């Protein structure tokens, strides 16, 4: 599973470049599409919501199957190269729809874009795992991919307003801009970077192969911790705009806060790579969890006008985000490099499934809980705002502590599986 020669820094960066357009594409799909089709095209919120729910459930369920198939058909780079043009065409259609577009258009384009995106991202992650020469190079590859991905998120968040005064026009231009962006990144990443060493896939049918991946004790332990930690990280993402608007009361700074958060995450990635090299990935990840717990504890005391303090929280939580982005996939890559059992694509298919399920669970847990605690957007009642602070800060803190405890309890099993 490891390559025969270490990949130089230029090769690591060229591999990571493709992460920028992939993350760039993800943000408008998840953030802007609902408002675009409801506000600009006049579709009912119930119809848009039903389409989004159905397509996202189907998308998440398909990911393990895509991972299984990716282990058996074509090379990683060829699968990525086939998926990217489909993604580009689909994204243009999704973000620049004709005036007559309705629910059928939205559903068809979401299915097309989601499928192409999953094929590209699952094989991109698996390719990175197969490229690594040793534990350190696997960490560097993941950090490169996630660092460029964070820059892609910041770029996608800023561009619609920069490209046009009307959000719908700006989104259409973002879709067209994605075409040359992904083409240039694909040329840099797919041409000249080695293929990596790919294990021959077995002959199992999909479900036995996917079930076999989950039976691997090291993978199951790591996936469980990743799931619990991911829900803890996704809850603040689902509630941060409410927190900024009604607790900090600086909604005018929400874009700046998010930009600082993502840029801090990207800037901190080299620090996590160095710390992982010094104390090991598992302990470095625990350190990141500890930093996140401290930040969430501080956030619970934020009040109206505390913009500077919340900016510092965004910087520190962004640094903790870097650990969550770089270290768990690098641990998975180490496990796959040592273990001849589960297929790389199958494991990353399950990994992607859990990532998407975390986002759905976080929204499904946190938003109804806010309503139960008496909060509604625009609330100024002390009890409602206390409930918002509890969901934004206290609930993730508790879940992070559980995740850290699980990682510590399972450290022996995970370290045994990933040690060289």
Image: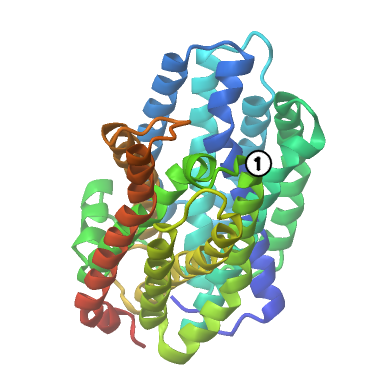
Q: Residue furthest bottom?
A: 278
Does residue 329 appear left or right of residue 218 in this picture?
right
Location of residue 136 with respect to 105 vertically, above or below: below
Location of residue 290 with respect to 187 vertically, above or below: below
Does residue 385 appear left or right of residue 121 in this picture?
left
What residue is shown at x 36% (from left), y 61% (from top)? 201
Location of residue 400 with respect to 175 vertically, above or below: below
Q: Who is closer to the viewer here, 188 or 411?
A: 411
> Does dot 1 land on a helix, a strand or a loop?
helix
Horizontal and vertical percent position of residue 34 = 53, 26
Task: Answer few, some or many: residues within 10 Å of disc 1's Cα (few below 14, many 20 plus, some between 14 and 19).
Answer: few
Horizontal and vertical percent position of residue 332 = 38, 70
Q: Who is closer to the viewer here, 235 or 2?
A: 235
What residue is shown at x 40% (from left), y 61% (from top)? 296
- Do we see residue 357 in this rendering? no
Q: Quadrant of the C terminus?
A: bottom left
Which quadrant of the figure has residue 60? top left
What residue is shown at x 29% (from left), y 82% (from top)? 415
Does residue 182 appear left or right of residue 303 in this picture?
right
Horizontal and vertical percent position of residue 343 = 34, 62
Q: Residue furthest front?
A: 382
Scheme of image coloration: rainbow
Q: Quadrant of the N terminus?
A: bottom left
Q: Who is closer to the viewer here, 208 or 116?
A: 116
Q: Who is closer to the viewer here, 352 or 66?
A: 352
- Do we see residue 35 in this rendering? yes
Horizontal and vertical percent position of residue 265 = 57, 65
Which residue lies under the disc numbered 1? 252
Counting the numbered discs, the total is 1
């Amino acid at each position: 599973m490891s390559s025969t020669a270490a990949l130089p820094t230029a090769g690591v960066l060229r591999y990571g470049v493709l992460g920028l357009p992939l993350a760039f594409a993800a943000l408008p799909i998840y953030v802007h599409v609902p408002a675009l089709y409801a506000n600009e095209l006049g579709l009912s919120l119930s119809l848009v919501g039903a389409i989004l729910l159905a397509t996202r459930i189907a998308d998440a369920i398909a990911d393990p199957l895509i991972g299984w198939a990716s282990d058996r058909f074509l090379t990683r780079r060829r699968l990525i190269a086939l998926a990217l043009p489909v993604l580009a065409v689909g994204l243009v259609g999704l973000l620049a729809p004709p005036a007559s577009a309705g629910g059928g258009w939205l559903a068809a384009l979401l299915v097309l874009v989601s499928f192409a995106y999953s094929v590209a991202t699952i094989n991109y992650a698996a390719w990175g795992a197969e490229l690594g020469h040793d534990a350190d190079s696997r960490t560097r590859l993941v950090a490169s991919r996630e660092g460029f991905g964070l820059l892609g998120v910041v770029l996608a968040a800023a561009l619609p307003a920069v490209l046009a005064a009307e959000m719908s026009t700006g989104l259409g231009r973002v879709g067209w801009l994605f075409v040359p962006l992904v083409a240039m990144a694909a040329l840099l990443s797919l041409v000249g970077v080695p293929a990596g060493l790919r294990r021959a896939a077995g002959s199992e049918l999909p479900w036995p192969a996917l079930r076999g991946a989950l039976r691997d004790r090291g993978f199951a332990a790591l996936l469980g911790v990743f799931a619990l930690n991911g829900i803890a990280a996704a809850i603040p993402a689902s509630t941060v705009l409410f927190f900024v608007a009604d607790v900090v009361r600086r909604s005018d700074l929400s874009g700046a806060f998010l930009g600082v958060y993502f840029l801090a995450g990207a800037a901190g990635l080299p620090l996590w790579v160095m710390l992982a090299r010094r104390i090991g990935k598992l302990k470095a990840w625990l350190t990141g969890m500890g930093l996140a717990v401290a930040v969430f504890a501080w956030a619970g005391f934020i009040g109206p006008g505390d913009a500077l303090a919340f900016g510092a929280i965004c910087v520190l939580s962004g640094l903790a985000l870097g650990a969550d982005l770089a270290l768990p996939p690098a641990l998975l890559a180490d496990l796959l490099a040592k273990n001849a059992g589960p297929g790389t694509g199958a494991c990353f298919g399950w990994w992607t499934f859990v990532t998407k399920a975390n986002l759905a669970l976080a929204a499904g847990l946190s938003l109804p809980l806010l309503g139960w605690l008496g909060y509604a957007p625009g609330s100024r009642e002390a009890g409602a705002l206390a409930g918002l602070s509890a969901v934004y800060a206290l609930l993730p803190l508790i879940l992070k502590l559980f995740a850290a405890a699980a990682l510590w309890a399972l450290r022996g099993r995970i370290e045994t599986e990933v040690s060289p």
